[in-house]
């Protein structure tokens, strides 16, 4: 970029893919994010009943697909038949739920993949271990960052492979304050992932002094994108990577 309003270190990460323009957490959204020049994608992963690494956000499939039930209670033979696109738009009819392996096979190594470990309903499952195994199998350790609101997941990931980056997600406001401060230290994260409304320049400066990145979610308004630039965050996670890039180039 030649425009000085776009700091060279700032990366644009597409939230659940380019989810403002395509159905969230689908290959269509991930491919579009890549085509639009995003620096990476953020996605969610959880285990099916038969231990498949399913890319999906909600505990249940009801909101985004034509199916019903909770992912951890359903088998992949059923999940793979669901339509995850038609509720977004007619042009996406038949878009399936992907497995994490599908995403890694097609897009791994092309840009950053931020994998949120979504086992909040089943915190004692094998999700973290299986994700780390897949990252190692596909030799993507340098291209993936694992994130979670559950510090236990990050500790398990560190114990299994400390070279894989780990992002501690913090809830907005007072609920996330301990994770942005003293409590977060317990989880030995390599990046803090706070809500953008809680981010100030002094927080970013403090994290950078500790050698940690600050990657903020979910930023879509122009004024918020520009404020995050001025705070010198490392990544902005947004729903429309094209608009975010245009905002920085014009701002």
Image: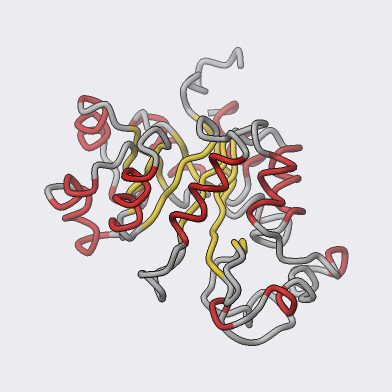
Give percent across and percent down for residue 49: 57, 77
Side of 153 relative to 105 (left or right): left
Residue at image coords 74%, 82%: 66
Give percent across and percent down for residue 70: 56, 82
Side of 20 relative to 70 (left or right): right
Residue at image coords 32%, 43%: 192
Answer yes or no: is residue 221 visible. no
Comparing 57 with 139, the one in front is 139
Side of 48 relative to 121 (left or right): right
Residue at image coords 55%, 42%: 135
Quarter of the image where one finds residue 38: top right
Answer yes or no: is residue 20 visible. yes
> Against 241, is 213 above or below?
above
Comparing 13 with 21, the one in front is 13
Quarter of the image where one finds residue 128: bottom left
> Against 218, is 1 above or below?
above
Comparing 169 with 186, the one in front is 186
Give percent across and percent down for residue 76: 69, 73
* Quadrant of image for the N terminus: top right
Quarter of the image where one finds residue 32: top right
């Amino acid at each position: 970029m030649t425009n000085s309003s776009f700091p060279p270190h700032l990366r644009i990460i597409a939230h659940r893919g380019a989810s403002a323009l395509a159905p969230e957490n689908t290959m269509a959204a991930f491919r579009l994010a890549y085509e639009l020049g995003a620096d990476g994608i953020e996605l969610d992963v959880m285990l099916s009943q038969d231990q498949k690494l399913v890319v999906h956000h909600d505990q249940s499939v009801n909101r985004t697909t034509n199916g019903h039930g909770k992912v951890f209670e359903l088998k992949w033979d059923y999940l793979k038949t669901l339509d995850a696109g038609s509720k977004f738009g007619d042009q996406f009819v038949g878009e399936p739920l992907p497995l994490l392996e599908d995403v890694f096979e097609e897009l791994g190594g092309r840009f950053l993949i931020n994998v949120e470990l979504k086992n909040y309903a089943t915190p004692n499952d094998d999700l973290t271990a299986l994700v780390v195994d897949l990252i190692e199998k596909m030799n993507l350790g340098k291209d993936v960052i694992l994130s979670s609101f559950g510090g236990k997941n990050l500790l398990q990931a560190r114990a299994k492979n400390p070279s894989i980056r780990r992002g501690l997600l913090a809830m907005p406001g007072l609920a996330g304050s301990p994770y942005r401060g003293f409590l977060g230290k317990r989880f030995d994260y390599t990046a803090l992932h706070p809500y953008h409304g809680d981010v100030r320049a002094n927080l970013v400066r403090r994290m950078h002094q500790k050698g940690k990145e600050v990657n903020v979610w979910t930023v879509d308004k122009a004024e918020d994108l520009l404020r995050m630039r001025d705070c010198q965050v490392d990544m902005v996670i947004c729903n429309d990577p094209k608009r975010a890039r245009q905002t920085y180039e014009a701002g």
